[in-house]
Amino acid sequence: MPRNKLTDMHNILMEQLERLNDDDLTDEELQAEIKRSRAMADISAQIVDNARVHIEAAQFQADYNRETPVLPKMLGIESKK
């Protein structure tokens, strides 16, 4: 099971942006990075949507007076007990 957090995804996307900004890339290398970036963006969007569902579930728990909402582990935030 992956142990990555959303902050890890942010760092990976920033690294990809740096690769795209590399002036030394050949046209072929740039096209490969663009293709990879599109795939990363698609996957990232799914991860963010999944996290949003988890956050909404935690908000639902909080709204209905559950003492300690269970936050998704992927956020890297520990629930206060």
Image (spheres, grey):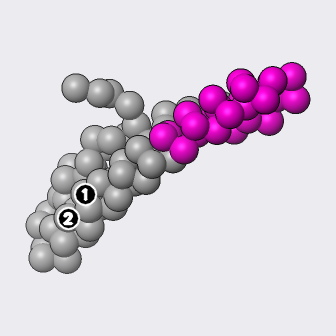
Magenta stretch, overall SS: helix
Residue 28 falls in image quadrant? top right
Residue occupied by mark 1: 54
The quarter of the displayed image where residue 21 is located:
top right
Which kind of residue does numbered mark 2 sit on?
Ala
**Alpha-carbon span between mark 1 and mark 2:** 5 Å
Q: Which residues fall within the magenta stretch? A: 16-40
Residue 1 left/right relative to 64: right
Does residue 37 appear in the picture of this structure? yes
Based on the picture, tell me whether residue 18 belongs to the magenta stretch. yes
Relative to 64, say whether 67 is above or below: above
- Which residue: 18% across, 58% down? 68
Residue farthest toward the bottom in the current orientation of the protein: 63
Is disc 1 placed on a helix, strand or loop?
helix
Residue at horizontal 40 percent and vertical 37 percent from the top: 5
Determine if the magenta segment contains residue 73: no
Residue 20 screen position, x and y as percent: 73, 35
Mark 1 and mark 2 residues within 8 Å of each other at the beta carbon: yes
Circle on res. 57: 2
